[in-house]
Amino acid sequence: MNNLTLRKFFFTKKAFSMVEIIITIVVMTIGILPIIYFITSTTKGVSATIEELIITNYANELIDNIASQKYTEVPLTPEKNVEELIKQSNFFSRLHLKPIKPDFERYLKIYEKKPDKFLAEYDEFTRKELEKILTFKVVEVTVKYNAKNEVSAKKNSKSLKVCSLIGGDAGDI
């Protein structure tokens, strides 16, 4: 193509045709949709990770506070809402717990585990000492998250159960 033909091609064409516009829109849509999907799915993943981190922190905070108490002072508790326990019990009202967000709930259960029948083969003194050492309290913390999504009216629920053992040594009991 010579210089005159190029000039004629570029300078005589005044607008794009409808077909060219439609093809451009389709190509751009095909290119942009995966990027938009990637951004929205990443945002959902980040918010889910934040919720799981908050749930874990609430459970660990409660377990750490209970574990820092003297073994003999930790009361046995059926599964109950922690906020109710704080109102009802001096022990739980002494714990240094941060207030939880409205969509979260903490439940606590503390029970004692004693050694089974294998101690029967020892003499009474040894059996009592081993029972003191091998007796521990199980602390089960369940944190539930129930949030309603404003956009889709779907409930987003998560739950985490964390267990820890608190043992007393022979001198503490």
Image (tube, rainbow, N blue to C red):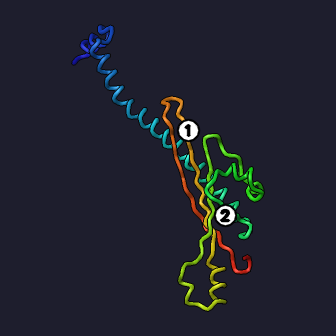
Residue 4 visible (yes or no) = yes
Looking at the rendering, which quadrant does residue 22 occupy? top left
Q: Amino acid at mark 2?
A: Leu
In the image, is residue 89 above or below residue 164? Answer: above
Which of label 1 and label 2 is nearer to you?
2
Q: Position of residue 81 (x, y in %)?
A: 64, 50
User: Residue at the spot x=69%, y=78% of the render?
Assistant: 169
Residue 126, relative to residue 27: is it above or below? below
Q: Earlier in the sequence, mark 1 or mark 2?
A: 2
With respect to residue 144, does 71 lie above or below? below
Q: Secondary structure at mark 2?
A: loop
* Residue at image coords 67%, 61%: 64
- Residue type marked 1: Ala
Which residue carries the number 1 mark? 147
Work out how far the residue at label 1 is from the one at label 2, CA to CA, in angstroms.
31 Å
Please give left or right for residue 142 compared with residue 88 in the image. left
Residue depicted at x 46% and y 35%: 40
Q: Residue at x 74, y 50 (%)?
A: 87
How many labels, in total? 2
Please tell me in which quadrant of the rendered image residue 3 appears.
top left
Asked if the residues shown at circle 1 and circle 2 are in contact, with their CB atoms under 8 angstroms apart, the answer is no
Can residue 57 be seen by looking at this rendering?
no
**x%, y% of residue 28?**
36, 26
Q: 128 and 149: which one is in front?
A: 128
Asked if residue 31 lies left or right of residue 165, the reply is left
* Mark 2 nearby-residue class (10 Å; few <14, some 14–19, many ≥20): few
Q: What label does residue 45 carry, if any?
A: none
> Which numbered disc covers residue 76?
2
